[in-house]
């Protein structure tokens, strides 16, 4: 960790092998530390101050201009100690993400759909326990891991998202805002993410880049209101009621590829 020098990679075009991320840490929203999010990254405090909170209770604060390496530290959270949002810039080398392509059948589910933004995902994600309760209350077994299905990604950052729970025959359970739907059959690119859910953005970017670099095309259509995806799904494989450690959360990304 050192003071900032003249760092040309903070702005302007980067070589294709590298990527630059802007990470915001709000004053009232500490960011859980996920070592995978910072692996191999050089991090600069672009604006504000950054407080690093350790598991043993220690805190160290870094001012604007500090250059940090946050990989494999014993941290609990990254926090903003000041009144204004802390802005971090992280630059690292793009690493091909391991993924596989598999053919999947139609998979019916009981779901609910809503519009939100990345900051208000809870309005849809928090509906998953209620859907599970509806299924189990009817004496019907859950057919797999619950998920979020991203239908439309709007240019202004808005999201059209479904929360779903796999069920063999969801139609009798529909009603009160819940509907029966199907994850469509097809060939999917599938990758696993291990760690805090905040790391899913980086995991998604890595999957998108790796598959595109391999010359494969996504099942997505560009329209004036945004990207319409055939099936872009996050399956939550870990029961958060049983596993308290966010570092052990396992999520499967399954995005459908374009047909021949």
Image (tube, rainbow, N blue to C red):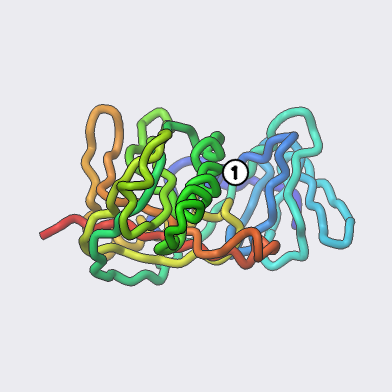
Residue at the image point whose x is 59% and y is 45% from the top? 89
Q: Which residue is tagged 1?
A: 23
- Indicate the quadrant containing the N terminus: top left, top right, bottom left or bottom right: bottom right
Q: Nearer the viewer, residue 182 or 214?
A: 182
Q: Nearer the viewer, residue 142 or 161?
A: 142
The reply to whether residue 215 is in sight is no
Residue at the image point whose x is 69% and y is 59% from the top? 70
The answer to which image quadrant residue 72 occupies is bottom right
- Under circle 1, the secondary element is strand
Asked whether, in this view, residue 207 is left or right of residue 184, the answer is right
Q: Nearer the viewer, residue 165 or 205?
A: 165
Residue at the image point whose x is 46% and y is 67% from the top? 192
Residue 20: horizontal and vertical position, in percent? 50, 49
Residue 84: horizontal and vertical position, in percent? 72, 29
Residue occupying the far front of the picture: 139
Q: Crowding near pointer 1: few (<14 within 10 Å), some, many (20+)?
A: some
Asked whether, in this view, residue 172 is left or right of residue 250, the answer is left
Asked whether, in this view, residue 89 is left or right of residue 100, the answer is right
């Amino acid at each position: 960790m050192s003071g900032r020098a003249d760092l040309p990679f903070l702005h302007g075009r980067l070589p294709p092998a590298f990527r630059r991320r802007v990470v915001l840490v709000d004053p009232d929203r500490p960011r859980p530390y996920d070592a995978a999010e910072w692996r191999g990254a050089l991090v600069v405090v672009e604006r504000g101050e950054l407080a690093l909170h350790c598991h043993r209770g220690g805190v160290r604060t870094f001012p604007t201009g500090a250059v940090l390496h946050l990989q494999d530290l014993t941290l609990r959270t990254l926090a903003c100690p000041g009144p204004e949002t802390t802005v971090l810039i992280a630059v690292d080398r793009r690493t091909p993400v391991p993924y596989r392509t598999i053919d999947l059948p139609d998979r019916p589910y009981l779901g609910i759909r809503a519009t939100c933004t990345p900051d208000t995902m809870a309005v849809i994600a928090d509906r998953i326990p209620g859907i599970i309760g509806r299924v189990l209350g009817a004496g019907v077994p859950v057919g797999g891991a619950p998920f979020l299905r991203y239908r439309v990604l709007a240019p202004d950052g808005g999201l059209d998202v479904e929360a779903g729970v796999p069920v063999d025959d969801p139609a009798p359970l529909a009603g009160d805002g819940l509907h029966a739907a199907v994850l469509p059959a097809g060939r999917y690119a599938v990758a696993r993410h291990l760690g805090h859910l905040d790391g899913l953005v980086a995991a998604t970017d890595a999957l998108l880049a790796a598959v595109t670099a391999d010359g494969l095309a996504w099942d997505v259509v560009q329209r004036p209101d945004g990207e319409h995806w055939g099936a872009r799904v996050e399956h939550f494989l870990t029961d958060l009621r049983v596993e308290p450690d966010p570092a052990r959360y396992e999520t499967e990304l399954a995005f459908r590829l374009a047909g021949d």
